[in-house]
Image: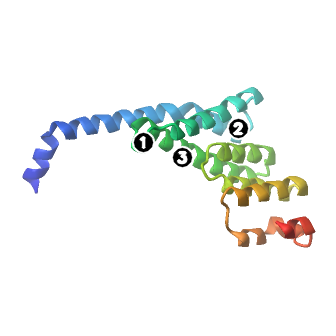
């Protein structure tokens, strides 16, 4: 096994693949560094409003790059998918943290970023519905719940959570 491992490490194809993977990781880091910092600034309430549009654009551009790949194993599409996945997770986690700190505007923006960068935006819409429920904005809550279910969210038990309790007898909520 040691001889085979040594031979594999000496193989030019292995060395090239290793270089390619390191290059891809660096490209991914480069693609996520600015948006990641902007997400943190948004979560901290320090992101200027004009930078929010640029941040959202970064998410949609990465999503577009994942969709325009000619085949599923295209390295650029893989880098974009990895970068976007990390940023969506960061936006979701930061949004939850903003909820915990009762920074509802920031949470809505962060969950909107997650929606804009997701192939399956249902979870992000559900999180936005939670924020609207917490702020007693029934109209937007119902709209977001409809979008959540249209976007693939399939957990009706989630509507039993505390923030939705005041709306349980509401006909619009029951209809959703």
The Cα–Cα distance between marks 2 and 3, rounded to whole angstroms, is 18 Å
Q: Earlier in the sequence, mark 3 or mark 1?
A: 1
Crowding around mark 2 (Cα neighbors within 10 Å: few <14, some 14 to 19, many 20+) is many
Residue 108's place in the image compared with 19, above or below, is below
Image vertical order of residue 30 relative to residue 91, above or below: above
> Is the C-beta separation of discs 2 and 3 under 8 Å?
no
Q: Position of residue 47 (x, y in %)?
A: 72, 32
Q: Visible in this render: residue 100?
A: no
Residue marked by disc 3: 85
Q: Position of residue 141 (x, y in %)?
A: 84, 56
Residue lying at the far top in this picture: please name it: 50
Between the residue at mark 2 and the residue at mark 1, the CA separation in whole angstroms equals 35 Å
| Mark 2, secondary structure of its residue | helix
Q: Residue at x 76, y 47 (%)?
A: 108
Displayed quadrant of residue 112: top right
Image quadrant where one finds the N terminus: bottom left
In this rendered view, identify the residue nearer to me: 4 or 140.
Answer: 140
- Label 1: element kind: loop
Taking the spot 77% from the left edge, 72% from the top edge, the residue there is 160
Q: Secondary structure at mark 3?
A: helix
Alpha-carbon distance for marks 3 and 1?
A: 19 Å
Q: Which mark is residue 71?
A: 1
Q: Which residue is mark 2?
A: 42
Q: Earlier in the sequence, mark 2 or mark 1?
A: 2
Q: Is residue 170 visible?
A: yes
Picture residue at 72% right of the left edge, 61% below the top: 149
Label 3 Cα neighbours within 10 Å, binned few <14 / some 14-19 / many ≥20: some
Return the x and y of residue 100 as percentages of the image width and height: 74, 55
**For residue 53, which quarter of the picture?**
top right
Q: Earlier in the sequence, mark 2 or mark 3?
A: 2
In the picture provided, is 129 more to the left or to the right than 83? Answer: right
Image coordinates of residue 56 in percent, x first then y, are 67, 35
């Amino acid at each position: 096994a040691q001889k085979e491992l040594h031979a594999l490490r000496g193989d030019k194809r292995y060395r090239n693949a290793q270089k390619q993977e390191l290059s891809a990781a660096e490209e991914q880091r480069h693609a996520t560094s600015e948006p990641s910092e902007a997400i943190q600034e948004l979560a901290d309430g320090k992101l200027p409003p004009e930078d929010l549009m640029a941040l959202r654009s970064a998410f949609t551009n990465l999503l577009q790059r994942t969709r325009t790949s000619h085949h599923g194993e295209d390295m650029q599409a893989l880098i974009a998918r990895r970068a976007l996945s990390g940023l969506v997770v960061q936006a979701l986690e930061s949004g939850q943290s903003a909820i915990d700190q009762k920074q509802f505007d920031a949470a809505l923006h962060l969950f909107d970023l997650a929606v804009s960068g997701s192939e399956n935006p249902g979870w992000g819409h559900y999180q936005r519905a939670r924020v609207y429920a917490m702020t007693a904005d029934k109209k937007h809550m119902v709209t977001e719940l409809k979008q959540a279910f249209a976007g693939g969210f399939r957990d009706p038990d989630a509507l039993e959570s505390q923030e939705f309790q005041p709306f349980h007898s509401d006909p619009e909520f029951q209809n959703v």
